[in-house]
């Protein structure tokens, strides 16, 4: 009898655990509850042009003094977000467009952030008087800029940044090359989750800016940066036009030593490893106190960022400043294992360089576990993204990443198989702050075989979690899951909605041709309509069933509702899916919160051309 009781209790606990994991404590699932099954590089063979990233309207975070009461956010530039643990994030930024202070702040959820603390402040210990050169006798200070970081497997935070003398920088660096360089500081979390910073160490000497740190699969650390040190040392600082390209140093011992070693007084023109150089033609240098008559080769390639592709190679994106002073984004792909060939002085490269894929500046790269590459950049004062092919050789259309920020420079962080957090500078009145956006990857989903009861409940779907997400335009948002059996295709739509109203609806579109699809619309009262649309011509179709469970009070905006769960069954014969192995999908949500309806579809995806919709594979 006891064994039976223990066995029964174990089954109950297991059931409770399974239900809780699938959101049994909720009546309506969110996108965070779904897409729990994933395999590395599972989408590398898919058409990456049908993948997109959907901003979550509910998860936009503004970091400025009115929202946080912390004034250090009000002059924030160059944000870089990293993840310390599943429940702890760190964000770095500059206090000013060129420094002089560097700050970090922590958050346990990516939403609420601490008061920023400086880890490089231009205080009295950073001030000095020049004793030689053209600035002799003048007061100056060492400023920090362009911080980036990586989290090691042991939890150490390796933060790098550029340090340079402020007045000398304003004077086009003057001849103070040895005072410039890349610094590194190692941070560790204490028992209270506070960062304890160690000694600041100079690991490269020479003029430059915008360092980026990257880790390879074998543990090698690589630092890339925008460097004009070699040309500055050889020819002086061109007042009109810099010649800039990407240099690199490496470490194989978690950042304790770096090679090649470039120190003060370097006799080799401060050369590390040249890894990215894009030719922009020749010109005669325009340098103070020097006269040149022969043109020299000029290069571009700055603000480098790197991501590891599914095949182990590295993809680099740079900001290319062209001869006409416009900014483009260019790409380069490493050799196997993320290794880069060192280029000669007059050599463009790497061999895989892809010139000027689009207008833009301030690139940032990330690779989703499924294989798609996510490129963000700013163009003017707006932030955009493009999906890149898993091998880095092709790119999709420009799409809006976080509209209306009015800033420049940003970064992104993949925090799960489908979620990415973007951190972009944002303009708030006459001040700058940081805006964070949580977005979710939409791509091909798989519909498993099952025959659910059409009752508006999601319990039967716990082993079928592939989902699409729509929710960038308003607080109401939906997820869509698909299943099928021999005769029917089934849809489960979870609708989060604080204010349920008559006329609210969800739409599932079933693409069966390039411009032919079925539109299934279900309202909160359970009424359903099906239209066949062929090149814009609509034909009514009869069939199918739907069940809706609402959690809240419809048409009562004095309270806060949870939403609704909608379950739909459609005969395959009705929507031309008999014997089909897949179809294209595009869900939508109709929301009646305001004076008029908002219809939100997959962000940046054409609503009436099915070729760009993600595929649903009928397993």
Image (cartoon, grey):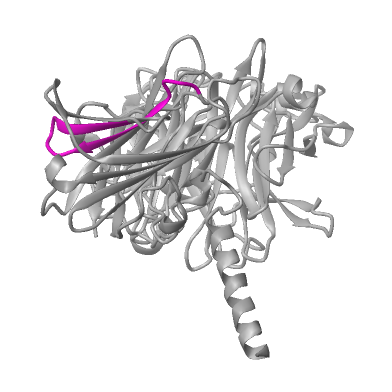
Q: Quadrant of residue 452?
A: bottom left
The quadrant of the rendering that contains the N terminus is bottom right
In the rendered image, residue 451 lying in the magenta stretch gets the answer: no
Please state which of residues 274 and 88 is positioned toward the viewer in this rendering: 88
Give the overall secondary structure of the magenta segment. strand
Please state which of residues 316 and 5 is positioned toward the viewer in this rendering: 5
Above or below for 426 versus 193: above
Above or below for 338 versus 471: below
On screen, residue 148 versus residue 388, left or right, reads right
- The residue at 38%/41% (across/down) is 547
Above or below for 383 versus 390: above
- The residue at 36%/58% (across/down) is 310
On screen, residue 341 versus residue 9, left or right, reads left
Count of residue discs: 0
Residue situated furthest right in the rendering? 124
- The residue at 73%/29% (across/down) is 100
The quadrant of the rendering that contains the C terminus is bottom left
Q: Quadrant of residue 540?
A: top left
Q: Quadrant of residue 316?
A: top left
Give how far across and how far down residue 174 sits, in percent. 64, 26
Please state which of residues 336 and 238 is positioned toward the viewer in this rendering: 336
Magenta span covers which residues?
Answer: 501-521
Residue situated furthest front in the rendering? 1
Mark yes or no: residue 90 visible.
Answer: yes
Give how far across and how far down residue 211 sits, in percent. 56, 42
- The residue at 30%/54% (across/down) is 446
Give how far across and how far down residue 201 sits, in percent. 73, 52
Give how far across and how far down residue 191 sits, in percent. 84, 60
Above or below for 234 versus 474: below
Mark yes or no: residue 272 visible.
Answer: no
In the rendered image, residue 513 lying in the magenta stretch gets the answer: yes
């Amino acid at each position: 009898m006891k064994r039976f009781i223990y066995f029964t209790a174990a089954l109950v606990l297991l059931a409770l655990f399974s239900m809780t994991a699938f959101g049994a404590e909720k009546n309506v699932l969110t996108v965070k509850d779904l897409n729990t099954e994933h395999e590395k590089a599972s989408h590398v063979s898919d058409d990456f042009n049908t993948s997109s990233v959907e901003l979550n309207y509910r998860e936009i975070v503004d970091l400025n003094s009115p929202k946080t009461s912390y004034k250090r956010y009000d002059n924030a530039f160059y944000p870089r977000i990293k993840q310390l643990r599943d429940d702890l994030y760190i964000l770095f930024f500059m206090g000013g467009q060129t420094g002089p202070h560097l700050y970090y702040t922590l958050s346990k959820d990516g939403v609420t952030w601490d008061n920023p603390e400086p880890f490089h402040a231009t205080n009295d210990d950073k001030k000095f008087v020049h004793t030689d050169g053209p600035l002799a006798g003048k007061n100056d200070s060492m400023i920090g800029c362009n911080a980036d970081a990586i989290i090691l497997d042991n939890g150490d935070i390796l933060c790098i940044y550029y340090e340079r003398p402020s007045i000398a920088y304003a004077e086009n660096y003057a001849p103070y090359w040895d005072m410039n360089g890349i610094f590194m500081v190692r941070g560790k979390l204490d028992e209270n989750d506070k960062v304890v910073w160690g000694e600041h160490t100079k690991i490269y000497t020479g003029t430059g800016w915008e360092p980026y740190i990257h880790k390879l699969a074998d543990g090698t650390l690589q630092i890339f940066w925008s460097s004009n040190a070699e040309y500055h040392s050889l020819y002086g600082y061109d007042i009109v036009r810099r010649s800039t390209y990407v240099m690199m140093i490496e470490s194989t011992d978690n950042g304790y030593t770096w090679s090649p070693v470039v120190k003060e007084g370097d006799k080799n023109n401060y050369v590390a490893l040249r890894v990215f150089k894009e030719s922009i033609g020749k010109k005669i240098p325009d340098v103070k106190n020097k006269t040149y008559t022969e043109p020299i080769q000029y290069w571009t390639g700055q603000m480098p960022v790197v991501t590891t592709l599914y095949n182990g190679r590295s993809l680099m994106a740079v900001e290319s400043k062209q001869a006409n002073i416009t900014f483009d984004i260019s790409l380069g792909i490493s050799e196997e294992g993320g290794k880069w060939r060192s280029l000669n002085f007059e050599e463009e490269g790497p061999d895989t360089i892809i010139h000027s894929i689009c207008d833009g500046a301030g690139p940032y790269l990330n690779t989703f576990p499924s294989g798609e590459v996510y490129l963000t950049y700013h163009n003017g004062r707006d932030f955009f993204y493009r999906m890149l092919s898993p091998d880095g050789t092709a790119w999709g259309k420009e799409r809006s990443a976080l509209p209306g920020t009015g800033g420049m420079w940003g970064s992104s962080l993949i925090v799960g198989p489908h979620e990415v957090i973007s951190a972009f500078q944002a303009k708030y009145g006459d001040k700058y702050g940081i805006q964070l956006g949580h977005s979710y990857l939409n791509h091909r989903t798989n519909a498993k075989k099952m025959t659910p009861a059409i009752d508006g409940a999601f319990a039967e779907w716990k082993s079928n979690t592939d989902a699409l997400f729509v929710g960038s335009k308003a607080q109401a948002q939906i997820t869509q899951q698909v299943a099928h059996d021999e005769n029917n295709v089934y849809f489960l739509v979870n609708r989060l909605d604080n204010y349920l109203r008559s006329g609210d609806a969800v739409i599932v579109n079933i693409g069966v041709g390039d411009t032919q699809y079925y539109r299934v619309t279900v309202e909160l009262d359970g009424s359903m309509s099906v239209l066949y649309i062929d090149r814009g011509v609509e034909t009514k179709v009869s069939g199918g069933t739907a069940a809706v469970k609402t959690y809240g009070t419809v048409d009562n905006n004095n309270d806060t509702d949870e939403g609704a769960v909608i379950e739909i069954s459609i005969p395959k014969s009705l929507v031309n899916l008999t014997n089909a192995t897949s179809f294209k999908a595009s869900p939508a949500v109709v929301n009646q919160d305001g004076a008029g309806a908002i219809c939100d579809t997959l962000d940046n995806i054409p609503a009436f051309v099915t070729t760009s919709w993600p595929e649903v594979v009928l397993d």
